[in-house]
């Protein structure tokens, strides 16, 4: 873990959440007063399959230490099949990142429905903890985008 | 070679085809280049030797827009790419007259140089019916080496000498496969995460972003490519940070995942000798393991693995479980 002048290193975590289930799940977590770390920055997307592999790499480039994608449970997609395609794409992408020697665990997919506020908060807490244990992302970052 | 020329002349004179897509001598004798021939007289320049590794199927995209049929010579591995392009509606089957040509493996000049043979001026006896030994003319005199010792690495893992699509066949093929396709990928998978990172960092840092791998790839046939976009700071340029190299290669491999036939052209043309097939084969191996065996270009009907799904597909978490 790198200590910066300003103080302790804080991870930057990007969470792509689909509009129909997971974003609503995050909302529910909020209105139920369940907490999740402020290190998580949510980006709302219309569907989990909107997330192009480039989005994930871009997030890492710009300094993210972990990227998580949340969508409706398989079978519950608002657009019927979007998350099925997302599931295959992310499986292959994560496997490729692992193959290139990018630490396992910096990427994750979790299915969170609109009713699962508790799952949302638990998932985010777990994920942030994992990123703390992995430390700063140096293998897939762009030096020019640091600080 | 002569029989190819004779047949091409015949088809041209009968009016069955309007042009011929083949190879002609390039700037260096061991570097033939793809070429269109429209007149019978020009066909004398057509060559088909051991260095005709270039896959002509991608040129059929432009030929499909021209009037009349085009005669195209395809090696067994090229026919997979051609099928894939038909499936993607990028080439018109009706506009092509495919002659499946035999193959005894194609040569890699770098493999000859690696044997200590320098100052090469020309290489003879590399045709389909040539001997097992090839003669290399150099400024230091004549040298020899075996045909097999100079094969392109892709030919050692050749998918087979059966043409997947053709109108007629010409020339005998010879078996070249003597290694397993996924062995290299398996070796890398067995390394530790740090070793893998170091290995790819070393290979990819050689990339000069010449885009040759993309330009030659039959699967990279989009009219607009993300790597030409000036709005996205991903356009062609020398890499300033190691991130850009990785992004280019991950994204390019991803964009052809499930469509790449493993034709091996990307690795063949890379001026920096980067083993690009290691990316594509990793995707192919994963697809085979997760979603069942799939060979792009095997036929023109089967749905691709990234454009289909099943309810029971593995979760992305499997990557972590496998380690
Ligand atoms: S991969 Fe097979 S068909 Fe293709 S050039 Fe090599 S030996 Fe010939
Ligand atoms: S052909 Fe080689 S050097 Fe050129 S862009 Fe592709 S990987 Fe980089
Ligand atoms: S990525 Fe390489 S092996 Fe795959 S289709 Fe393109 S050129 Fe051929």
Image (cartoon, coloured by chain):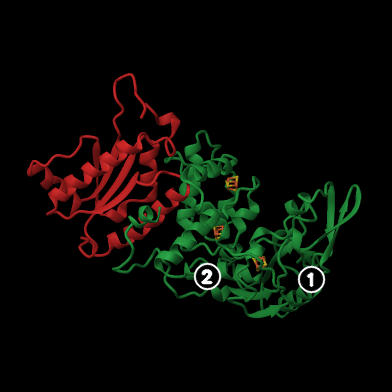
Chain colours: A red, B green
Residue B274, x across and y down, in percent? 61, 48
Label 1 near ligand 1 (CB < 8 Å): no
- Which residue appears at 51% of the width and 70% of the height? B86
* Position in image of residue B191 (x %, y %): 51, 49
Q: Which residue is mark 1?
A: B1
Disc 2: CA contacts within 10 A as few (<14), some (14-19) or many (>=20): many
Identify the residue position indicated by label 2 in the image.
B297
Residue B167 located left or right of residue B117 = left
Give the mark nearest the N terminus, 2 or 1.
Answer: 1
Task: Find residue B309 and name its label.
Answer: none
| Residue at 14% over, 39% down | A35
Name the subunit of mark 2.
B
Of residue B135 and residue A19, the one placed in the foreground of this image is: B135
Q: Label 1, secondary structure: give it.
A: loop
* Corner quadrant of residue B203: top right
- The quarter of the image that holds ligand 1 is bottom right
Residue B119 left/right relative to B7 = right
Q: In the depicted view, which residue is nearer to us: B323 or B273?
A: B323
Up-down: is A67 above or below B168? above
Q: Does residue B39 appear left or right of residue B261 in this picture?
A: right
Query: What residue is drawn where x is 72% and y is 60%?
Result: B151
Residue B293, x across and y down, in percent = 46, 70
- Residue B136 x/y as whole percent: 85, 56
């Amino acid at each position: 873990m790198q200590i910066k002048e300003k103080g302790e290193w804080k991870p930057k975590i990007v969470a792509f959440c689909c509009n129909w289930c997971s974003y609503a799940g995050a909302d529910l977590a909020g209105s139920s007063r369940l907490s999740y770390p402020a290190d998580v920055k949510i980006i709302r997307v219309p569907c989990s399959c909107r997330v192009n592999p480039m989005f994930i790499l871009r997030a890492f480039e710009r300094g993210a230490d972990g990227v998580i994608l949340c969508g409706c449970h398989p079978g519950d997609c608002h657009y019927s099949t979007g998350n099925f395609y997302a599931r295959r794409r992310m499986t292959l992408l994560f496997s490729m990142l692992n193959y290139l020697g990018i630490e396992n665990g910096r990427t994750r997919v979790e299915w969170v429905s609109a009713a699962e506020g508790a799952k949302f908060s638990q998932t985010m807490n777990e994920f942030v903890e994992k990123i703390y244990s992995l430390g700063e992302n140096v293998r897939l970052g762009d030096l020019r985008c640091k600080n | 070679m002569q029989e190819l020329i004779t047949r091409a002349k015949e088809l041209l004179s009968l009016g069955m085809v309007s042009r011929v897509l083949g190879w002609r001598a390039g700037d260096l004798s061991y570097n033939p280049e793809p070429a269109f021939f429209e007149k019978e007289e020009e066909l004398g320049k057509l060559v088909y030797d051991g260095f005709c590794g270039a896959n002509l199927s991608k040129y059929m995209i432009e030929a499909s827009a021209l009037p009349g049929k085009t005669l195209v010579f395809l090696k067994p591995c090229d026919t997979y790419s051609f099928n894939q392009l038909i499936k993607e509606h990028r080439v018109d089957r009706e506009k092509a007259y495919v002659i499946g040509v035999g193959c005894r493996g194609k040569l890699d000049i770098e493999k000859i140089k690696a044997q200590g043979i320098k100052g090469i001026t020309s290489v003879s006896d590399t045709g389909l019916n040539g001997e097992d030994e090839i003669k290399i003319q150099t400024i230091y005199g004549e040298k020899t080496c075996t045909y097999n010792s100079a094969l392109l690495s892709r030919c050692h893992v050749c998918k087979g000498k059966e043409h997947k699509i053709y109108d007629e066949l010409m020339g005998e093929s010879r078996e070249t496969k003597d290694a397993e396709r996924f062995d290299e990928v398996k070796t890398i998978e067995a390394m530790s995460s740090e070793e893998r990172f170091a290995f790819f960092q070393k290979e990819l840092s050689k990339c000069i972003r010449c885009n040759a791998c993309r330009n030659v790839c039959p699967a990279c046939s989009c009219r607009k490519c993300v790597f030409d976009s000036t709005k996205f700071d991903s356009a062609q340029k020398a890499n300033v940070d190691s991130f850009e190299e990785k992004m280019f290669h991950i994204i390019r491999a991803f964009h052809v995942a499930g469509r790449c036939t493993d034709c091996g052209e990307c690795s063949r043309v890379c001026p920096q000798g980067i083993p690009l097939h290691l990316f594509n084969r990793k995707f192919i191996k994963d697809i085979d393991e997760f979603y069942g065996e799939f060979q792009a270009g095997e036929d023109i009907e089967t749905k691709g693995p990234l454009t289909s799904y099943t309810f029971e597909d593995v979760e992305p978490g499997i990557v972590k479980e496998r380690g």
